[in-house]
Amino acid sequence: MGSVPAQPWWRRAVVYEVYLRSFSDASGDGLGDVGGLRARLPYLAELGVDALWVTPCYPSPMADGGYDITDHTDVDPRFGTLADVDALLDEAHALGLRVVVDLVANHTSEQHPWFRAALAAGPGAPERARYFFRDGRAGGDEPPNDWVSAFGGPAWTRVREPDGRPGQWYLHTFAPEQPDVDWGDAAVQQAYDDVVRFWLDRGADGLRVDAAPAMAKKPGLPDAGHGPGARFDSRRWTDSPHWDVDDVHAILRRWRAIGDGYPGDRVFVSEAVVRPERLSRYVRPDEMHTTFNFDFLIAPWRAGPLREVIDRTIAGLRPIGAPPTWVLSSHDETRHVTRYARPQPGADPAAPDGDAPVDLELGLRRARAAALLSLALPGGAYVYQGEELGLPEVEDLPEEVLQDPTWLRSGHTVRGRDGCRVPLAWSGDTPPFGFTAPGVQPWLPQPAAWAVLTAERQRTDPDSTWSLYRDALALRRQLPGLAAEELGWDADAGADVLSFRRAPGFRCLVNLGEQPVGLAGRGRVLLASGPVSDVLPPDTAVWLATDGRRPDLRSP
Ligand code: NOJ
């Protein structure tokens, strides 16, 4: 084995997304919590990830699953206590796991003391300057401009003034319960500096910046040109007055300067759903360290578009020296087993047809191949909880249990994100599958069919998806070829095949076509996403050693 070049940990980390509400419940109320996560840390260490990103645990009325925060420096009692978070950090660190926490700075909860004070104070009061309160148009009855909310409908809601009359409007890029703060206000800037320091002081290894492109607005809040019924489509907008406005970067630089003052390679990762060519601006040397790659996530399961996204990602980031990240699923997106279970669209990298029937066996085969693809690419990767179990989206949740604000805001036409947030299946043969105490109903119901997908079952099955992830993560740590930052495509691979080398001695081959692909002469199989012989079947990936010998896989 060669030596692994020294790099900061985050340049090639595999980060496991813990969607806290749905990970594991220690308190027995049906909602995941910090205690549940602490108890499962050995599971994550055994799986072999490098770090966790933990979604919000802060006090919240839960209008948007905890992304509506009333106090950014405390813990909601439903999730635990600050002492639990301290223990989580200590225990994770003792197991060699880093912990990244969520920083939600575009908006607060409508129950935040700032917003309550702003409502109580009335028009023109300094308390309103922390948010965007404006008079309506048409004598006050129409929103101040045409901006749209990410969850559907206008981005403005009218308030009742302290005297009881209908009054000003306030801006909310997301749900009405999530008013946007005004980053032009010095008190806002100062308060968030303190939030960043609070979590770094406590020992967090980094912060994931929620909705980064929303944080700055064009002065004067001009119309965006959205027509009636316009949808939120930030990957296609150019020069939007409310998304990806250049002033966002001053905020990111401010936080980076704070983080750089701390020892131990603290990291910032931005969530930035922007036009592909704008993404690299978020990871310039004095801004975020990494950013989620949603273009990879939404690419169809086809060789051409995937290769195009991979090349574009690497080429866009190389000049500024930032590493790519590879993301397949998250708590905001349809799980990729289900996305890949539908007919994949053509050359246009748009989402697959959401109404087409699913072939979940096919989806899982592709998802397993996609895991080997994404874990073989240079840079870092994100694993969303449950993808290591091959969980599909739960598309038949009864309407009465749906909680995502999208469901309500779309007039009950878009079901939203609850289907990817169903609590994990840990053990046993019946719900709640070890997620919570026996007999307790999890906050979203789990399908009975998940009995065969529990972590307990899969950990002892060498052919399971869990074992595939564990083996891939172990190899990723050990193979020197996977530590380098370069990738070379094999020219002769064929139009439906992705075949690339990582030096020294590694090749990844993914068959996205309908015909088997010969493996002779390409290398020795180290790991395969499905059964292989001398050919690689469709929708299957392999990792190959190309130096003619199997590397020594014992711990160095
Ligand atoms: C992105 C988060 O991932 C999502 O869950 C949330 O609804 C929005 N930002 C608003 O905070």
Image (cartoon, grey):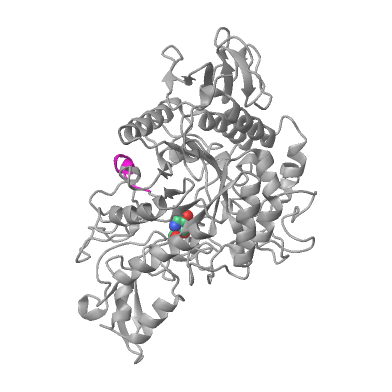
Q: Quadrant of the C terminus?
A: top right
Query: Which region shows up in magenta?
Result: 273-280
Is residue 278 part of the magenta span, yes or no? Answer: yes
490 or 224, nearer to the observer: 490
Q: Quadrant of the N terminus?
A: top right
Q: Is residue 527 visible?
A: yes
Residue in view at x 29 percent, y 52 percent: 249
Residue at far top of view: 521
Q: How many marks?
A: 0
Is residue 548 part of the magenta span, yes or no? Answer: no
Q: Position of residue 504 (x, y in %)?
A: 50, 17
Task: Give the main secondary structure of the magenta stretch.
Answer: helix
Q: Is residue 79 visible?
A: no
Residue in view at x 71 percent, y 46 percent: 450
Instruction: Classify 154 as above or below 554.
Output: below
77 or 438, nearer to the observer: 77
Q: Position of residue 120 (x, y in %)?
A: 37, 86
Residue 381 appears left or right of 471: left
Instruction: Classify 472 as above or below 277.
Output: above
Residue 290 appears left or right of 359: left
